[in-house]
Image (cartoon, rainbow, N blue to C red):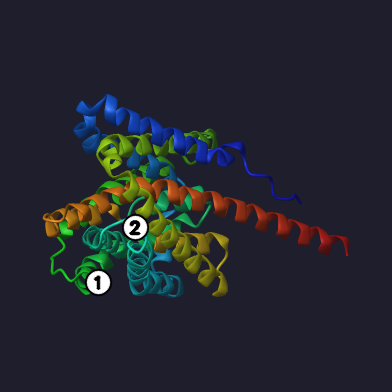
Amino acid sequence: MRLGKALPLRTILFPVFVMISMILGVELSFRASNYIAGVSTFGIPIGLFFMIYPAMTKVHLKEILGGMKDIRKLGLMVFLNYAIAPFLVAGLGYFFFFEIFERFGLISSQIGSQVLVGIILLGVAPCIAMVMVWTDLAKGNLAAGVSFVAWNSIIQVLTTPFLVYLLARTTLIIDPLVILKSVLLYLVSPLVAGSLTRYLLSRKKYFTGLLNLLGGVQILALMFTIVSIFWSTGSGILDHASLIWMVGVVMLSFYFVLFHLGYFAARKAKFDYPDSTAIGFTVSARDFEISIAIAIVAFAAYPYVILTTAIGPLLEIPLMLMIVWLQLSRRNAILNSNAIKEVSVAEK
């Protein structure tokens, strides 16, 4: 019987790694701008694949199929993702940009209106890629996270046009091929690669060592992806640096509130830490690729809408990593508390 351990040094230094990666990416966006197109086209997808693939080596397909049939978990996830999240992000965006930033003269009404639409676009589509990375890093139920992603990839095709029309008053048709491409790149291909790795090597003596090695690969891929994202967009977005922190305030509030709404609602429903963590990340992480695609297609005449959706991925990774760090601390506290209770019972 052992007490929960202290957080590992790698986890404690997460924010430092992220900050260094962000600074390096911005520096490269100025010093190596000729490579931006290649980094955006190839660097980010490669980084995302190697972030997700290590997580998929830990997943059993039977657990994923079982998760897709769990009505209670799915019902809570769907309710929070489609009945709460879009309206919460719209409400937070309106409150901060019109009740605070505009009133203090930090932004004009015209630009604020465009930014609000961009924030709404960031909030309507749930994530179908990186949510698995956050769930894995925070020791959540990865199989449940994959099953949630599979459902979200189907549901958002139907709900996104309706939600965009309702909140941003724009009629559009979502091309299912855009979502299918993301599903194939960031869900199916890492899942197939991870399943093959597990099938071929799970009985080998070195499989545990391989999983530990892939855990290091995942962290390196995360740092590489951050560098790539800031490299591809950093120089242009820094021209609107004030907008970054204003959008950041809204999105941090959104992620923090919605994650904890999902996490504590799941805990209230008697789900354990891994399941609750998977639900929390699934309902808070957003699909910035879909948001950017909608902005370019439907709001080409409004540059601040597109700019806001481009800021989204710059902010999501560091903000979600903050929540990962918080969850690991929370998990450690739960383990310590459970261990102390077990010791008390044993002594009696």
Tell me the quadrant of the picture where the C terminus can be found: bottom right
How many numbered dots are placed on residues in this image?
2
Q: Quadrant of residue 205?
A: top right
Q: SS at mark 1?
A: helix
Q: Is residue 169 above or below residue 287?
A: below
Q: CA distance from mark 1 to mark 2?
A: 16 Å
User: Does residue 205 appear in the picture of this structure?
Assistant: yes
State the image coordinates of residue 203 (x, y, percent, origin top left).
Answer: 50, 40
Q: Residue at x 34, y 42 (%)?
A: 48
State the image coordinates of residue 71 (x, y, percent, origin top left).
Answer: 42, 74
Q: Which mark is residue 167?
A: 1
- Residue, disc 2: 286
Q: Residue at x 74, y 56 (%)?
A: 339
**Viewer-nearest residue: 12 or 71:** 12
Q: Quadrant of residue 198?
A: top left
The first of marks 1 and 2 along the sequence is: 1
User: Does residue 191 appear in the picture of this structure?
Assistant: no
Residue pushed farthest top? 31
State the image coordinates of residue 6 (x, y, percent, origin top left).
Answer: 68, 44
Q: SS at mark 2?
A: loop
Discs 1, 2 touching: Cβ within 8 Å: no
Are there few (<14), some (14-19), or many (20+) residues within 10 Å of tag 2?
many
State the image coordinates of residue 204 (x, y, percent, origin top left).
Answer: 50, 36
Q: Residue at x 41, y 56 (%)?
A: 249
Q: Which mark is residue 233?
A: none
Amino acid type assigned to the residue bearing label 1 in the image: Leu
